[in-house]
Amino acid sequence: MFMGEYNHTIDTKGRLIVPSKFRETLGEEFVVTKGLEECLFVYSSEEWKKFEAKFSEVSQFSKKARKFARFFFAGAAVCEMDKQGRVLLPAVLREFAGIEKEVVLAGVADHIEIWSKDRWQDNSEYDDMEEIAESMAELGLI
């Protein structure tokens, strides 16, 4: 499980140091893809395979499913961590997420989100958490 919030920077080559608390769970090879709200999602190979298996059961005759698949799978890249715990984020993904220098890595249970620091701060409004918590309770999550 991933949890916690970490501030890091991208070097001039587009590499990011993965927090040590995430490295063991993530493994040496993992998947980075376009996420929702203009961030990146990072999945361990194991979690990515689970997601692929679930998605393979979705009807390909659904226009929304096809559109989601193109967004999520076509934007995905298998990445590897080097010996210093760094990952090279593909330029197309950095551009999508507006990542230039400062980033925030957030552990979100089964995956990690990578945000440009500016976008993270813009999305850090939690005025509606009581309403969201009620919705989560209706789903039986809390």
Image (cartoon, rainbow, N blue to C red):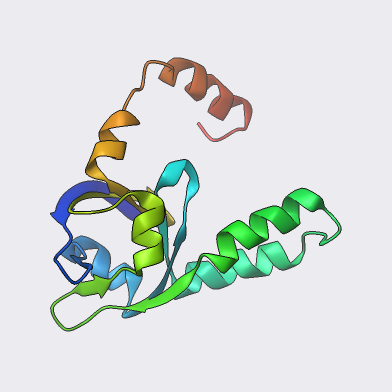
Considering every residue shown, the one lying at the far bottom of the view is 83
Q: Quadrant of residue 84?
A: bottom left
Residue at 33% in and 76% down? 27
Left or right: where 116 falls relative to 34: left
Residue at 50% in and 23% down? 132
Residue 99 in view, yes or no: yes
Find residue 122 and report its horizontal and vertical position in percent: 31, 30
Task: Say which quadrant the N terminus sits in.
Answer: bottom left
Left or right: where 115 falls relative to 73: left
Left or right: where 115 falls relative to 142: left
Foreground pick, 98 / 64: 98
Find residue 56 and report its horizontal and vertical position in percent: 73, 68
Foreground pick, 33 / 13: 13
Eyeballing the image, is 139 above or below 63?
above
Residue 1 in view, yes or no: no
Foreground pick, 6 / 47: 6
Residue at 35% in and 31% down? 123
